Amino acid sequence: MRLCVSPASLRRPLINIIKSVPTNIITGFLGAGKTTAINRLLANKPPSERWAVLVNEFGQIGVDQSLIDNDEAVHIQEIPGGCLCCARGPQLRVALTRLLRTAKPDRLIIEPTGLGHPVGIVDLLLGPDFASVIDLRSMICLIDPRVLEQPEILSHPVFGVQIGMADILVINKSDLCTAEQLAEAQALSDNMFPPKHQVLTTSMGELNPDCLDAVAGAHTRRSGGALRPAASGVQEPPPDNAMTATPGCPAFFSGEMEGFFSQSWLFSAEDSFDTNRITDLLDQQRDCLRVKGAIRIGHTWIGYNRMLSDRTITQLAWRRDSRIELLSAEPLNIDALTNELLRCLKSV
């Protein structure tokens, strides 16, 4: 995905080109269910409206764009390779300008990476370049109540900033939680100061589109001195012309941020995986916090998505290539994993 916006076009005022666009930021830590929630919202959007989705990924190749439902009324733009508000800040400005000009959406949804700080995004949207063309509405944060039993996530600074800045807190995955976990999450949410505009409980990311316009303005969004990671720890995502692979010879990319490591493989669209072999291999990666993939299985593609022990497999409309990404707290054995992935191909 190449952003072909000339410096001259960036200098032209956006206010002369587009109307003020209702915009929502949907945050949540890794595995909270952001992509599923966005798909639910897209499925229930007004048929007459054209929506745009700007997705940021921690990994280098971008898997989430293949997991979001797309049609002629939905325009998706993705920025891989780190947090939008720090390492990818300049690219966010270019991507947002291009998206607003080309899609001319009736609504914009921004999904930062699960490790991303929303502070810088809000600052950009409310700043002089976009304040006249962005109508910032509800900021929504999804949480999985089971993280209350994971101190390493609770103590993570990004987790606290995401919750603190949100207007609406969504306790997601209620069908996977115990009654005690739900009660604890609800009690903590109800006792936050300043209080949230809404605290919702749902499963499978089911949200009423009305919540997108529940709050307008920026009265809860300034969090002051939120910590931001240094950009030096994040590798640049590969350029578009490097995002290629030949049959049986995948391209590999890696990155590191906030103490986590991403390992990403890009396979040719001609490569076809054996269903049982590839799903078994991905299931076995127990050292990984998150595993995602858009994978060709015969004549179709599946989406593989696992956070810790929670796994979902869905059918995808994606047909461009196969993408597999592992997120871990320690670097993985890349040579061994690459060989194992190759053994999952039907032709091997």
Image (cartoon, grey):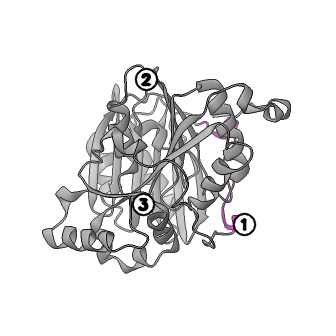
Whether residue 269 is situated above or below residue 201 in the rendered picture: above
167 inside magenta stretch: no
Exactly how many numbered labels are in the figure?
A: 3
Relative to 311, residue 231 above or below: below
Cβ–Cβ under 8 Å for marks 3 and 1: no
Mark earlier in primary sequence (3, 1) = 3
Give the residue drawn at x 61%, y 40%: 134
Position in image of residue 278 (x %, y %): 33, 47
- The answer to whether residue 70 is left or right of residue 286 is right
* CA separation in Å, label 3 and label 1: 22 Å
The type of residue carrying mark 2 is Asp
- Front of the two marks 1 and 2: 2
In what quadrant of the picture does the N terminus appear?
top right
Could you tell whether 285 is left or right of 261 in the image?
Answer: left
Work out whether residue 284 or residue 25 is closer to the camera in this orientation and state it: 25
Q: Which is nearer the eye, 316 or 139?
A: 139
Residue at mark 2 = 71
Residue 284 at least partly seen: yes
Say which residue appears at 66% left-offset and 62% top-offset. Answer: 234
* Residue 348 seen anywhere in this rendered image of the structure: no
Q: Residue 58: percent from the left, percent from the top? A: 54, 55
Residue that carries the numbered disc 3 in the rendered image: 30
Res. 232 mark: 1
Does the segment drawn in magenta span residue 238? yes
